[in-house]
Amino acid sequence: MQVSVDTTSQIERRVTVQVPAAEVDEAVNARLKDAAKNVRMDGFRRGKVPMSVIRQRYGRDVRNEVVGEVMRERYVRAISEHELNPAGFPQIEATVNEAGKDLEFVATLEVYPEIELASIEGTEVERPVVEVTDADVDEMIETLRKQNAGWEAVERAAEDGDQVTIDFQGFLGDEPFEGGSAEGHDLVIGSGSFIPGFEEQLIGAKAGDDTEIKVTFPEDYQAEHLAGQEATFKVKVHEVKGQSLPEVDAEFVKKFGVEDGDLDKFRAEVKKNMTREASQAVENRVKQQVLGALQKANDIPVPQALVQQEVDGLKRQAAQQFGLGEDFDVSQLPNELFAEQAKSRVEVGLLLAEVIKANELGASDDEIKAKVEELAEQYQEPEQVVEYYMGNEQMKTQVKSAILEEKAVDLLLEQASVKDVEMSYQDVLAAAQQQDEADEEEGSEESAGEEERQA
């Protein structure tokens, strides 16, 4: 077997392989002889069909089958001998495929890039410093009360946050439109579940009132025949209900896993959860700054095969998030919607892998177990969670990857200039949410930019 490797780009290789004709022809002949033993053909007894007939009838298919197997096997041998590290599957094409001639084929593949890491020294990283106060805990408990509130009928006019029971019918001009009516519908004013402008016009309504509400459907409304249209809704208000907040007593706290109903334990548990949430938000904010600096300092080529794998994963996540069902064909979703986000993820993954490799980072079983125990604290039965994770190699591998990523980020953070910034609990969470929204918006803008470039 003769092999030559041409470098066509930083991450693309063209591998040309030649296999002696005798090896391929002998394999084809052996396969034909083996097949001849079981061939049934009119005019011949089983196994007695002349080889000339067998070759004429089956020769091309058998050769294609043998050549396909040979190319796959010799490709694997070639990349192993030349120490190539393929990223994804190759494109293999036979360039010479005739009996009596050496088989020649070309494999075009992408390889993982060789990375020489540049330092992020000089990068300024802001690290929030946050303390969960008693006032923060009080506010969280009030939120929990609202989440567990009941509804009680009131005799007054409806206010923002009230629940109203209504009948309604929508009209375009004088004609009612399909899907625009309901009876006995419970609507919380301010929930944003109806089109803009509808809920606000119910403020001040009382049980027994008949009212008309005028709204304009958004231009991007999912029902095209309603998009941008002005509509009138005739509404009958049957009942107005106000929130009935539960008392923070033993029965209330038992709902949150404090079996003995102790209020001090409940407050301590709420504060513990809030502190963990704040800590995660801080770690994530620092991490995003570090990884952004790492990408900025290291412009690397990215194998398209890896990007496509990530795109496919993001498509599956999107389908699951929007409840499209397991049978939904994710190939219907345009690659462009996910391409830039996928490319960024692959870049970060390759760079972190190089940091881990260069610094010979590892994670022991004790470290993995400690991390699992930390994660398990969020659950009501942490012992079962720990047992499940430690007994599942795939889950352990995921935890190990998370630990290695944390270690890599910590190492990179040592190169940066860290500035501690005092922030409140609410500000830290708000900043984390804004960062998530900015990342999503950036992905959308980059996708739009890509579409413009292609146009």
Image (cartoon, rainbow, N blue to C red):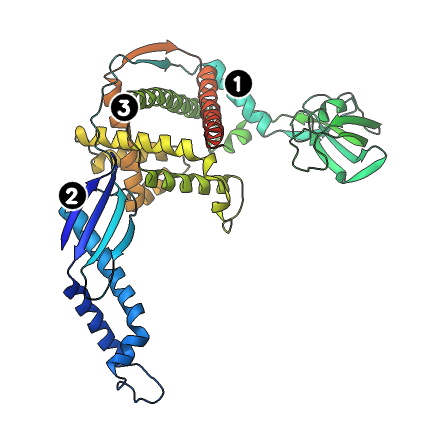
**Which amino acid is tagged 3?**
Asn
In the figure, is residue 149 to the left or right of 18?
right
- Tell me the mark number nearer the camera, choosing from 2 and 1: 2
- Mark 1–mark 3 distance (CA, rounded to whole Å): 44 Å
Helix, strand or loop under label 3:
loop
Say which residue appears at 29% left-offset and 12% top-offset.
418
Say which residue appears at 40% left-offset and 14% top-offset.
131
Q: Are dots 2 and 3 in contact, CB under 8 Å?
A: no
Location of mark 2 (residue): 83
Helix, strand or loop under label 2:
loop
**Which amino acid is tagged 2?**
Glu
Query: Which of these two is toward me, 324 or 91?
Result: 91
Q: Are dots 1 and 3 in contact, CB under 8 Å?
A: no
The crowd level at tag 3 (other Cα within 10 Å; few <14, some 14-19, many 20+) is some
In the figure, is residue 292 to the left or right of 206?
left
- x and y, in percent, of residue 296 in the image: 31, 21
The crowd level at tag 1 (other Cα within 10 Å; few <14, some 14-19, many 20+) is few
First reached walking from the N terminus: tag 1 or tag 3 = 1
Query: Which of these two is toward me, 224 or 231?
Result: 224
First reached walking from the N terminus: tag 2 or tag 1 = 2
Q: Which mark is residue 315?
A: none
Say which residue appears at 36% left-offset and 35% top-offset.
376
Location of mark 1 (residue): 139
Location of mark 3 (residue): 298
Q: Is residue 283 above or below residue 55?
A: above
Say which residue appears at 22% left-offset and 24% top-offset.
117
- x and y, in percent, of residue 94 in the image: 27, 55
- x and y, in percent, of residue 147 in the image: 58, 28
Q: Are dots 2 and 1 in contact, CB under 8 Å?
A: no
**Quadrant for the N terminus in the image:** bottom left
